[in-house]
Amino acid sequence: MSNKISKLRDDLIKVINGAHGAIDDRVSSAIGFSIRSRMLSLISKGISPVGNRGRFPEYKGVTQSKKLRQSLRVINRLKSANPAQVQRKKAQLRRSLDKSKKAYPFSVQKDFPSKRPRPVNLFLSGDFLSNLTYLISGIGKKAVIEIGYIDDLSAKKESGHREGVNGQPKRPTIPTGNESFSTIIVQDVAKIVKAALANYFRKL
């Protein structure tokens, strides 16, 4: 009996190890395509594909405009013994508000009318996100799927979003280090892998 159990265990290990063959180049391509598609979908809605990042923070110019408008509303409700001082403060706030309206994304709306304060979708001309792609090297057990931007300029833009250049909030689109993709992307991949494994074992 013990010999039969040992053989059964050895056979099971072989089957499990052999299941790596279920992830062939077709399945790997499906995974890469799924990740890219979901990333673009999330970014178009202003949501980071990186896990636990949630929505992209709003543009610096938009935040500044909101704060200035709030300050104007507050000062308009003030009852001051020095009306001249209040008027000066109002004029100062209005000048600052006019200046903030020239900041990004308002500054590009003449050339790109579709650019709006929300969602913060990182889309302007389309060049950046059109360069998001996936590459597959190896097959099966050694398959490696890489997701990234194919040209140097787009990679530089991604770095700028990740680091928050020019005082903008950080908006990374590619996981690095200990980061991972968002839950919905991981679930997409899990569904593809689960289906591939089920199909593989049906053929045994």
Image: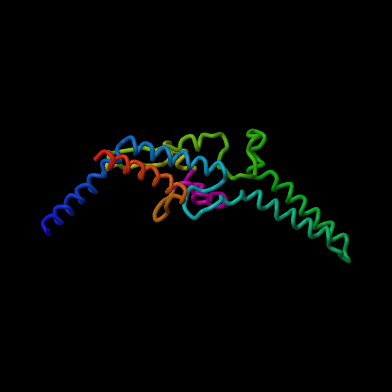
Q: Quadrant of residue 25?
A: top left
Q: Quadrant of residue 189?
A: top left
Residue 162 in the image: state x and y as whole percent: 49, 50
Q: Residue at x 75, y 58 (%)?
A: 71
Q: Residue at x 41, y 51 (%)?
A: 176
Quadrant containing the C terminus is top left
Q: Is residue 78 above or below residue 64?
A: below
Question: Count of labels shown?
Answer: 0
Residue 89 in the image: state x and y as whole percent: 80, 58
Q: Residue at x 66, y 49 (%)?
A: 62
Q: Quadrant of residue 76?
A: bottom right
On screen, residue 128 versus residue 31, left or right, reads: right
Residue 93 in the image: state x and y as whole percent: 76, 54
Question: As rendered, which of 110 and 119 lies closer to the eye?
Answer: 119
Question: As rendered, which of 203 and 163 lies closer to the eye?
Answer: 203
Quadrant containing the N terminus is bottom left
In the image, residue 166 lies in the stretch drawn in magenta: yes
Question: As rendered, which of 29 and 68 lies closer to the eye?
Answer: 29
Q: Residue at x 64, y 44 (%)?
A: 117
Q: Is residue 87 above or below residue 30?
A: below
Q: Is residue 80 above or below residue 50?
A: below
On screen, residue 122 versus residue 65, left or right, reads: left
In the image, residue 6 lies in the stretch drawn in magenta: no
Which residues fall within the magenta stretch?
Answer: 158-174
